[in-house]
Image (cartoon, helix red, strand yellow):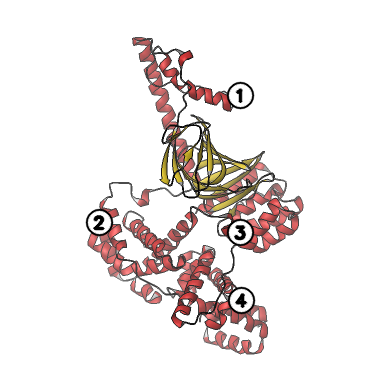
Amino acid sequence: MGNAAFVLDNAHHQNDLIDECRQGSREAMHSLYLQHQRRVFSVAVNFFGGDKDKAADVTQQVFLKLFTGINFRGDSRFTTWLYRLTINTCIDEARKNRRWFGLDELFERKERASAPDPDRSMRSEKIVSEVQAALRSFKPIYRAPLVLKYIEGLSYQQIAEVLECSVGTVSSRLNRGLKMLAERLGHLRNEI
Amino acid sequence: MNQEHHKRKLPEFVHGELSPEEHKAIAAHLGDCDECRREYDQLALGSAMMSRLQPGDAPLSVWSSIQEKLDGRDAPQMASIPEAAWFDLRKVFALAASVVMVSVIVVAVYLGLLADQTSPVAIGPALPAAKDPTKGPDREVRTLNGRSEVGQSSGADPGQRSPEVAGWKVETLEGSPSITNGARPGEIAIGQMLETDSRSKARITVADIGSVEVAPNSRIKLVRTGKDEHRLALDRGQLHAKIFAPPRLFVVDTPSGTAVDLGCEYTLQVDRVGNSILHVTGGFVALEDRGRESIVPAGMMCMTKKGKGIGTPFAVEADLRFRKALEDFDFGAGGSRSVRTLLEHADFYDMVTLWHLLSRVSKNDRGAIYDRLAEYVKPPTGVTRGGILRLDKNMLSAWRTEVEYLWFN
């Protein structure tokens, strides 16, 4: 879905819709929301390791920011700008983090044991859950390009535009992110 | 092409970002080079794992919530809520404080004149007296007791004055939190202790500047409350503070350091030994102990250890090996060995930590810290390597401003 979005968003219709939103049209806001909610929610839910409540909260924040005054100036593609807003909102939310925490939890994170699971669908769920948990433990600078690449299918150039960094930086962060994932979840090698 | 070059291109190879010629060349190379193939295998495994993740639609309730928020938009709009940038907050606080001070002075002068003209009895609350720099905690309590001096002019006998102190409202969130020394129901006063057991939680309203939630298994004492300072002591357990006040007005003592609010939201935990860990989620907190200070911005944490003092702040998502090395540096016998490990695992997000380390590492290690920090945050004009190596205060301060700006933006 990712690449198609970049083609579509340049349409004249998109700018008209944004203008109508600026004028307060609730109908236009709903149309814009329907067009982009999946994009925003998908990035957020995977950024937060499958936490749907957190992703719903981020989605709400992003669209409220969009509708209540943050100006899209049209000097980048709308979806690029929207992805950037989504990632920044995710990062802000991640910084707030948990309110209560334990010293043990912070400094002695234990590797999860991987007991063999006979049921295939359960195994698959378990793998997804472990990948999500591992991803959530990464710093946002690694999480963001991984999510944009694998969930939204953006190219290196598009990711670089969203994150406002060089293509080389995108490449090195994806490199490190994938290796960290492989190292962390090496015990799942035979199940992938 | 050499092997190193191929390694750098492997992510692009995995993601199909190379030209057909480059792709073909690397594919051929992987057949011959074990080292590159091992690297490729790692990336391919990580890639296969990431491919398991799926997109999804937002729950239907999200649009309803957005509509509700849009309908109630007479409240401040989200876009107008300031970012948690310290620089902006400082301006807001400074402006607000100035406005309040000017207003108070104007009203006081006006009322004072009015009082002189109409009646010998003072009108309204007593103005804050100029702070006596020699004033210690006991004096502070007396000043607080002296609030009823306002009533003195109406004929009350100072000798008969009740030694009442202002109390803070305490709300039970769960279970049965207890307050020692026979406090009034729902209130904690100076010198009194609030305790929660494993099933209790409470919320304290901190004068008129914010609130503190007290987690289970905690013990907290109200040490002081006055115009210049509100001070709690957290003996053990955990609190979450949300404060909106000028910097340094709200303070929490722990057995191993003092957390000074600089306009913020944070969680502070103290274990049974007296060690603590601070996690800041909004604004800044200064951790202080015996002349040493760590400035901890939102998104960072900092440890203190009883008898060893305060540590160096680190990003919440800092690499675990980085954290371990930092702990070893701060509280163990890490020294240069820890510094090397820190630099090995440091990245852009560790900029605030690196800035703090500039003045904490030995002179021999300072150059390496400077070089790494300069990679992430360009030293501003006038800040030189030589100046930082000799710990020029102005240069350190100028660079810190730059680091904090980048951290929040």
Label 1, secondary structure: give it: loop
Looking at this rendering, what residue extends furthest in the right direction? B364
Chain letter of the residue beneath label 4 in the structure image: B
**Real-space Cα separation, disc 1 to disc 4, in angstroms:** 64 Å
Q: Report the chain holding disc 1.
A: B
Q: Residues within 10 Å of mark 3 (few under 14, many from 20)?
A: few
Of badges 3 and 2, nearer the viewer stands 3
Q: Tag 2, which secondary structure?
A: loop
Amino acid beneath label 2: Gly
Q: Which mark is residue B8?
A: 4
Q: Which residue is disc 1 drawn over?
A: B134
Amino acid of disc 4: Arg
Distance Cα–Cα, label 1 vs label 3: 42 Å
Residue marked by disc 3: A107
Nearer-N-terminus badge (1/4) = 4
In the image, which is nearer the foreground, mark 1 or mark 3?
3
Q: Mark 2 vs mark 1: tell me if same chain.
A: no
Q: Position of residue B36 (x, y in %)?
A: 64, 82
Residue type marked 1: Thr
